[in-house]
Amino acid sequence: MIDKKLLKLLGNNKKYIFITVGLMVIGLFANITITASICLAIHMVINYQVIYSANAMCFIKPLVLALVAVVVRYVASRLVGSVRDILGRHAKKELRSKVYNKIVKLGVKTTNEMSMSGLTQVSVEGIEQLDLYYSSYIPQFFYSMLAPIILFFVTVWIDFRVAVVLLCCVPLIPVSIIAVSKYAKKIFAKYWGKYTSMGDSFLDSVQGLKELKIYQADELQHKKMNENAEEFRKITMKVLVMQLASTTIMDLVAYGGAGIGIGLSIFGVFNWGLNPVLALFLILVAVEFFLPLRAFGSAFHVAMNGASAGKKILDLLNQPDPIWGNGHISDTDIILQNITFSYDKRRDALKNINMSFGKTGMVSIVGESGCGKSTIVNMLSGAYRPDTGTVIVGGQMLEDLKREEYYSHISIVSYNTYIFNDTIRSNFELSNLNVTENEIYEALKKVNLYDFIIENGGLDKVISEDATNISGGQKQRLALAVNLVSNKDIYVFDEATSNIDIESEAIIMKNIKELSKKKSVIVISHRLENVVPSDKIYYMESAELKESGSHKELMDLNGGYARLYNIQKSLENGYSEEVSL
């Protein structure tokens, strides 16, 4: 009933569980003391100890005892609540920290089989559910195991037959819990699956709302969302029905067991010579045998929900980290040596790739879609490691380098580089904290964006979420400018000029070529005209490196590169002729 892996996530916070259980046990002894004080007072009345006022002082002892026990019970209850709150807050804080740190460690590597919506739901609401698992369920589990044993040793001295019967009835509650636990786990696993699926569908629909309107498919998507919502409603109802049914069963067991104990105590008065006052004590504490486990049973359903979310968090935390070392970069030349890589272990994305990139100069990687260009970028960024072969940076293997130091030398600009929902100035400062306004303006001029920024609020212009208040081309050029001020040694431009007009593209490529005089520049481009000035071009086909050399050398070779270049050139010339007509 306790998931050891989830419990291990608590770390040093486990101590709060034992403190909580200890305070709950103190509260139990206080309850027993209150019950005993009441029974003692009744015993005095029965024995006529207060007929005379002089004997009224006899009540002071049970009264004081009861008052002290009430105070202890109250303080223990308040402390239990406080410690549970501390446990919950610490658990949530550390879990969020672990999830965040894990995502940071994964870095540019995406999470396996977890969408952004699912990741958000699990790391936010899932951790909230685990709060209840840690602060309520686990302490109640240990307390519910201890309480019946403590009560047994208290009551066995009064009448062992009643004590044994009560103790034997107690396991019926965990048996009923175990009986539904397997079914409950399946239900809650489906519940979280439907929940995250519905979240994915909603987020997807919101993000693609413009396209849905254009395609006039919003009504169809609406129906799909309703279907997802209906499936989630059905699974939610199954959860509620299961909870209600199991709660009913536990109530029957708890109060039925207490009833048996009460009946046996009354029977003992008439047949075993049991003292009525002691029988009353047994009757009053009989229900205490079952209430802790009854409360545990109620917490069980919340725990199953938290445990299901916790397993998804564990899946995230258990993803293997990219391997990095502690080595320092002495040089920035990069060599891909005999690289072979497969995403699914069935089809190679790269086959025996050998490439080299110097400390300066412009090297381009080209080829048709799916040939492996973006996989090369993943190798350079450290997002994926080769199945065979080695990435060597400055004479050292990439996995031996310190991650932070490597990333301080490399910048990757892609067609979907993220722009933050902040001012333009702040986006530049993320790339280079010490960047000056003049440097920002120079970078904006290089990407043909200076006039637009000046005319639209300057550097304090706020970029909206997903950069919806600027065009796609402007977003891409801004991302390029931000990376230009980062002052890195290695720049990787992965389709960085797509969605940009021809004039701006020419300006950007001119600046990229200029940058290559001082830095190492690696260009991935589908448009071969952009790579003509390259010092070296790698041409790929079907995950293999087929040709390499300068533009002139490859054209003279009259191979795959020349064929692809000529096709693009004829298409562009044909389009230009049509436009001129």
Image: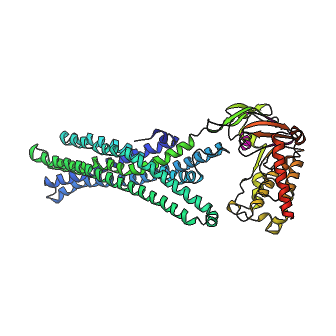
- Point out the stretch of residues depicted in magenta: 352-379
Where is residue 86 drawn, in percent x and y?
49, 51
Provide residue 143's location: percent of width, then percent of height.
36, 44
**Left or right of 328, for residue 212:** left
Q: Quadrant of the N terminus?
A: top left
Q: Is residue 264 toward the left or the right of residue 387 in the image?
A: left
Q: Quadrant of the C terminus?
A: bottom right
State the residue in front, 340 or 47. Answer: 340
Is residue 35 visible in this depiction of the protein? yes
Q: Quadrant of residue 575?
A: bottom right
Residue 190 on image: x %, y %: 45, 50
Q: Nearer the viewer, residue 85 or 358?
A: 358
Residue ID at (51%, 57%): 198
Farthest residue toward the left? 271
358 within the magenta span:
yes
How many numbered marks appear? 0
Q: Nearer the viewer, residue 249 or 62?
A: 249
Closest to the observer, 125 or 230: 230
Q: Is residue 11 left or right of residue 463?
A: left
Position of residue 296 measured from the top left corner of the image (x, y, whole percent): 36, 48
Q: Is residue 232 magenta?
A: no
Q: Is residue 405 visible?
A: no
